[in-house]
Amino acid sequence: MATVDRRTAIAGAAAAIVAGFAPSTAEEIKPPRIEMQPSLGDAFTEIGTVGTFAMLDTGGGRIVVSDRERAETGFLPASTFKIPNSLIALETGVAADADSTMFPWDKVVRDFDAWNQDHTLRSAFKASAVPVYQDIARKIGPERMQHYVDEFDYGNRDISGAPLDTFWLNGRLRISAMQQIGFLQKLYRGVLPISERSQEIVRDIMYIEQSELGTMRGKTGTIGIGVAPGSKATLGWLVGWVDQGNKKPYIFAMNFDVREPRQLAQRLQITKTLLKRAILL
């Protein structure tokens, strides 16, 4: 089998990322340039771990990457899969909207108090309630789930290797930071092959905070949590975008190895630090 040069692979990913921003004409659009910035990795070193950060600067026509190899390495999406899972739930009618459909608590007491209650789609997303999204996946069913994962061109598109209600936690599905950005920029622009309504609702429930960076929307994910009681985190995700109101968002994906529990609580701050540094470069 021929070996694909890593630089070529990233260039191909860049072309895929920019495709979602192409106009609906024959006008040629130039792929964003890749800017390798290894110094951004210092943010991970400062908390005693390793990771990667990738940011698509849609206004500047560039992708800033801290670790190009890791940015192209696929990992389980964990709870970042709640973004496509929510889209599919809305598109299939499993959830009518963000707030009216109720998903009753099954009365099983779990480690996270926020999971032990009834939820709407919005509250389940905010609480990252794994049991609710497992219920959603079962109601969607394997055929429809595979169909939409294929339509979204999500990661390696492989939902096998685990039951339908855990494949994003311990199955064969893998997605890289660069692929996360490719998916998210399509969602931001509303060009995924589903209704604009479903995309608008999910963009709304992805709200994280308003800060000096702008409006941040996104989702965390933690590999190792939610599969079995007492399981330990091994990797943390935060993916999303920052919108400053000018339709030129900074779309990002960050993941790092979890070596100490305290590091998970630092995800948002690390990401904001990385965004600030990358924007100024």
Image: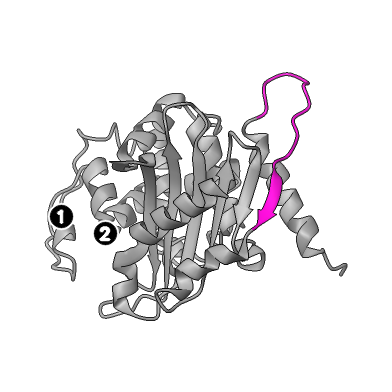
What crowding class fits label 1: few (fewer than 14 Cα within 10 Å), some (14-19), or many (20 or more)? some
The answer to whether residue 33 is magenta is yes
Report which residue position mark 1 lands on: 105
Q: CA distance from mark 2 to mark 1?
A: 8 Å
Q: Earlier in the sequence, mark 2 or mark 1?
A: 1
Q: In the rendered image of this protein, does residue 189 appear above or below residue 137?
A: above
Q: Position of residue 249 (x, y in %)?
A: 50, 36
Q: Mainly helix, strand or loop, the magenta region?
A: loop
Point 47% across, 75% down: residue: 45
Whether residue 161 appears in this view of the structure is no
Point 27% across, 35% down: residue: 98
Q: Position of residue 193 (x, y in %)?
A: 56, 32
Q: Which residues are magenta?
A: 22-36
Q: Are the residues tagged 2 and 1 within 8 Å (C-beta)?
A: yes
The answer to whether residue 118 is magenta is no
Report which residue position mark 2 lands on: 131
Could you tell whether 166 is left or right of 181 in the image? left
Residue type at the position of mark 1: Trp
